[in-house]
Amino acid sequence: MIPLQTASPHPVTHVRFSPDGATVAVAQPHYGVTVLERATGRTIATCVMPRRGPLTGLTFCGGGKYLAAANSKGLEVFEAETGAPVVRDYGVSFKGMRLAERDGAVIGFGLHTGGPVWRPEKSAEIADAFHPLMNVFRPTFTFSPDGRFMIEPHYREATLNDVDRGRYVAVLNRPDKNDWEAVVASAFCPLGRRFALNDGYTIDVFEFSREEADKPEGDSPEGVAVAPMPHVRLEPVFTLKPDSAAGQSRGWYPPFALAADGRGLLVKRPRNRIQLWDAPTGNLLNEWSWRFEWVTCVAVSADNLTAVAGGRHGRVLIWDLE
């Protein structure tokens, strides 16, 4: 276990592992992003972003060479090893973006823009790609790490959308939910096979097949009407409820993250305990409890061996899961 204190007292809002898992990016509002060495906790670089609000998107790109961050002002890209700024754009299209990484490029989704917005080979240039599906973008949308799939929350249920094809892939069944129990938080596992939804009452883990999503829709003969493909309806493979001892019935929004293989669910519990659940079996695998004040975010490395948690006052904790 490596307990750390960043140079800023602001709360940690995002933690991200680099693609090779060697470093961890720690984001704090009105300060920036600190890049830490996973093995030692040593500070490698600081991407300075003073007087910015909380980030809306954070991702490594270019094979981990660069770090892209989006906030209420716009989009900024830094060198991950030095923290040196590469490019920034404060245009209205890039405010409040969600970010993903595909083939080394940064994929951004916002109110006015959706698609590739920055490529390492064109380091001084930010694109303005538009995707029609983003007309209905809302702040609670979540995108898979590669930007291919999007979770769109609705009342009582949510949908899984294929961004590239501009169509729904599946409807996510949420039984026994009321109109006010809308999804407010969601997260994909790094490999994108499973994802989790949180509506303030439970955390529901779903699994979907990318092979099914990749099936062609088929061509119809000219002049022949073909019915649209039926939507797959997905049921939760695992549901986690709040600790009954805490007496919580609603308003339960704990930080959570899925392991790379989608099996492990890392979640904050009362008294700042952190638990690791096995989603397919519903078994509690491990639990940790430290004097760590108010866990705000968690993440798991791509090799499923290490986890990181951020907290108030700039505190960070890195520990081995095994």
Image: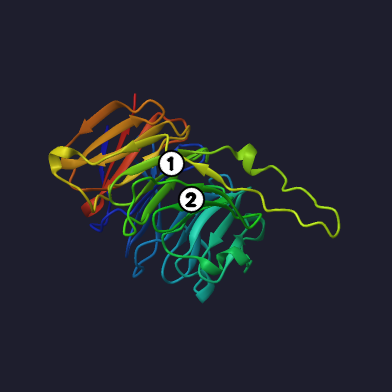
x 42%, y 34%: residue: 237
x 63%, y 43%: residue: 213
User: What residue sits right under mark 1 in the picture?
Assistant: 23
Query: Looking at the figure, which quarter contains the N terminus?
Result: top left
Q: Can residue 38 be seen in this view?
A: yes
The reply to whether discs 2 and 1 touch (Cβ–Cβ < 8 Å) is yes
Q: Could you tell me which secondary element the residue under label 2 belongs to?
A: loop
Could you tell me residue 219's position as x and y percent?
80, 50
Query: Where on the picture, by quarter, is residue 71?
Result: bottom left
Could you tell me residue 115's position as x and y percent?
61, 61
Pick the front one: 193 or 233: 233
- Counting residues from the start of the chain, the first of labels 2 and 1 encountered is 1
Residue 114, disc = none
Q: Is residue 66 visible?
A: no
Residue flagged by tag 1: what amino acid is it? Thr
66, above or below 122, in the image? above
Say whether residue 1 is left or right of residue 307: left
Say whether residue 234 is left or right of residue 295: right
Gap in Å between the C-alphas at discs 2 and 1?
Answer: 9 Å
159, above or below 286, in the image? below
User: What residue sits right under mark 2 in the picture?
Assistant: 80
Could you tell me residue 144's position as x and y percent?
52, 48
Pick the front one: 57 or 277: 277
